[in-house]
Amino acid sequence: MSAAASGLPIAQKPTPRRFHQARWDEPIIFELSVPGARGILPPATEAAISAVVGNPAAALPAGIRRERPAALPELSQVHVVRHYDRLSQETLGVDLNVDVGQGTCTMKYSPKVNDQLVRSPRLADLHPLQDPATVQGTLEIMWRLERMLAEISGMDRMTLQPAAGSAAIWTNVSMIRAWHAARGEGAVRDEIITTIFSHPSNAACAKVAGYRVITLYPDVNGYPDLGALRAAVSERTAALLITNPEDTGIFNPRIAEYVRIVHEVGGLASYDQANANGILGVTRAGDAGFDLCHFNLHKTFSTPHACGGPGAGACGVKADLARFLPRPTVERVGDRYVLDDERPDSIGKVRPWYGVAPNLVRAYAWIMSLGAAGLREVAETAVLNNNYLMAKVLEIRGVSAPYAAGRRRIEQVRYSWEQLTRETGVTTDEIGQRVVDFGTHYWTSHHPFVVPEPMTLEPTESYSRADLDEHAAILARVSAEAYADPEHVRSAPHASTIHRIDDAPLDDPAAWAITWRAYRRKHLGAGADTQG
Amino acid sequence: MTGPRAALVVNPIAGIGGRVGLAGSDGAEIVAEALSRGAIPHANDRAVGALEALRTRWGAARPVPALLAAPGEMGADAARRAGFEPLVVGALGRGSTTAADTQRLAGELIAAGLDLLLFAGGDGTARDICGVAGAPGVAVLGIPAGVKIQSAVFATSPAAAGDLAAAFLALPPGRRRTSQREVLDLDEAAYRRGELAPRLFGELAVPEAGRWLQARKAPSPASEAAAARAIGAEVAAHLVAGTRYVLGPGSTLRSIGERLGVAKTLVGVDVVELDAAGRPGLVASDVGAARLAALVEGCPAGVVVTPIGGQGFLFGRGNQQIGPDVLRAILARSGRDAIIVVATPAKLAALGGRPFLVDTGDVALDRELAGYLRVVTGRSEHATYRVEPA
């Protein structure tokens, strides 16, 4: 019997939905530690075994033996489970909310069947020191995945070793350096060019590698200023690292010209395809003349972002650069798969073993489940979703999409609340604080803000029309509130737990603490030699 | 039918502190000091430039707009030099002109009825105008003639002011669009002490016209200090021994002085020299245009400047001491690479894609400077950025 037939009233669900975040005031797990508490109490070793084995720790090489036990928190099992369940209620994620607000991050759904494959003992029980003859299936997956990604990007060879996107960019910069060094120009070519709307890891990796970084700012159309590129290139140019479409979501139709200008001075061109979600099966780095490229498998190819790691990166190179790839490579000899470590020009290893094998398997499974036509459909759906959402968002008072007025975007849009800020005084940071009251969030942009009062949305192919309508309705609601009652927006969140975070310590090396040990040392005054 | 009516008021002493290194012209003592240093007032020249551009842009096909003007050196002189026959409103007081004169005459011009009030001056003049024209409905446009121009009510150059005024007046009254723009000013006494603290004094209704307007100066957040130190380290590491460097005003430049161990003034133009061994020394502090030209004559020299935040001016605003003769001497001897531009990434981003602007007072030189310049944005971090005449 339905509720209506029973005569009971059916409550209408409000739109946008009501939401209230859980608040547990959960301590850091180290603060929950109780000396002596244990989650597992293994039985004592039987005397007969001890007599034979002795002290197993003594068998370990001295260099890897701990002088003191690791300073781990001590908790019972249920306290561990409760701790992490509570934390999971205090966050958002692609499996919980409509996560289109994390633009540039390509928060697509990670199919759970791929996790089942990864948890299978056939992968989970492997050890990287096993004889390659005993892991032929995994090596075949790596070999085939490399060919697929090379086909998708128009490159000749790939490495799957990098653990994430920045590691992949670092790998590409290392190969660029090796290329110029091999030609005797390593000392001269000390500059790398990138753009302000490319992923900042490009500038960061180039700088960490010792290069001077030259950044191109956008022209009035939002493209990297082509004249600035011409002015920047010289015999010192090692490479151009560039994204297309950039963070604005605008595809640069003259990208091949940028590549040509860099080639003319002897530099290489590397395509940051971390997020290739809008161009799969449509256009390729190799076809635009690029010498190198990389994918983030945890963006474009659906593997989990995993809270900042481990992800998986894949670098592609043209044949000329293949000798510099990290070693070992996976090669097929007859019907066998082997690891080739005899690569004298290789830049070496960029990660222990062969890469993040579980994510390689997930990406392989995802590609195989879709096929070539399916990949293109992913791109078309992502672009359609993005342009549908853009049409909805641009109806909202106070929002604009700077640059390329009237033109469509590829997979994401960097919007601006500048008009709303001017008219109401409410800033994008304050709108973002109010949006969390409806169970979602959005990201503004990298710093510095080139687009004023920015908001970057990227729907991907994973969200339904209803999902996108819901997200647009939340933004419309908050815009209306900003005009009618700006103080209500400024004083948000009202239904979430964390209010204003003072982010000044993030700029202060003396204050930031990204480990418990650093927190104790910097903020609790614990001595440097204190464990924990 | 009656045509559009414009009005002009000039603060004749605006900007005279700039060329002689006084960072502003507020107050009788500063004006006297500037005049004693040999400053020549040029606000009337800037007003003439704007009116001539207005005539050119307006064309000959229709009668020029009627022009109301304050008397003598406060408007009518410039109007006549630009070929207008002004309707003179009000009377000058006795002695040198003051802020009170600007306020009184602007009020009388508004009372006489106008479509657009043009004023030539700087932030101090904008404050005076704001006091009488702050009511909505009175359209106002500033002709830049002051030293520091923080306010967003100024066109980017006298010619741009004339262009914008002509475009605005040509529209039927119902289609003219204005937007409220900020009037900001520094406390000049605090500014000379080395504190940058612009205050908002009000708003004026300014004709809308995209990039012709000078944007409000971007504020400097605290984290910019770290970026400025990184720039200081980068520039200091690449200065060439045996070369004289002209350091323009601004906190970014001051960080270079700190890195070099010399006392750089915040608002003045200073000269440092690296001896043959590369050791830096202060040659001169807070110098005016004439002295500066003599200091860079005949020796390897460079110039280090930062664009004005939010506006992008490299030369011609806030650093008028670095005149065309100084720049020509440096370019002739050391080439374009001797112009070192520094800016934090946030400062570049705040320009919103607009180019750097140059308004040296020498049109040919402005054209020569146009193109692209390398910008130091951090340690081992550069940009290439477009430069255009204002």
Image (tube, rainbow, N blue to C red):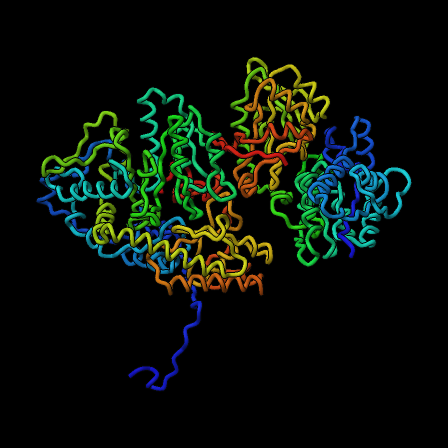
Apparent side of residue A317 relative to residue A227 in the rendered image (left or right): left
Q: Residue B29's x, y, as percent?
A: 82, 34
Res. B203 visible in picture: no
Q: Residue furthest front?
A: B61
| Residue visible at 68% across and 59% down in the picture | B174
Q: Residue A8's x, y, as percent?
A: 37, 84
| Residue visible at 38% across and 37% down in the picture | A256
Q: Nearer the viewer, residue B284 or B152?
A: B152
Q: Can you say which quadrant of the picture contains the N terminus of chain A?
A: bottom left
Q: Residue B307's x, y, as percent?
A: 60, 35
Q: Nearer the viewer, residue A272 or B72?
A: B72
Q: Residue furthest top?
A: B276
| Residue visible at 69% across and 56% down in the picture | B172
Res. B96 visible in picture: yes
| Residue visible at 71% across and 25% down in the picture | B289
Q: Nearer the viewer, residue B350 or B68?
A: B68
Apparent side of residue B87 relative to residue A508 in the rendered image (left or right): right
| Total number of numbered discs in the rendering | 0
Q: Residue A491's x, y, as percent?
A: 54, 60
Q: Can you say which quadrant of the picture contains the C terminus of chain A?
A: top left
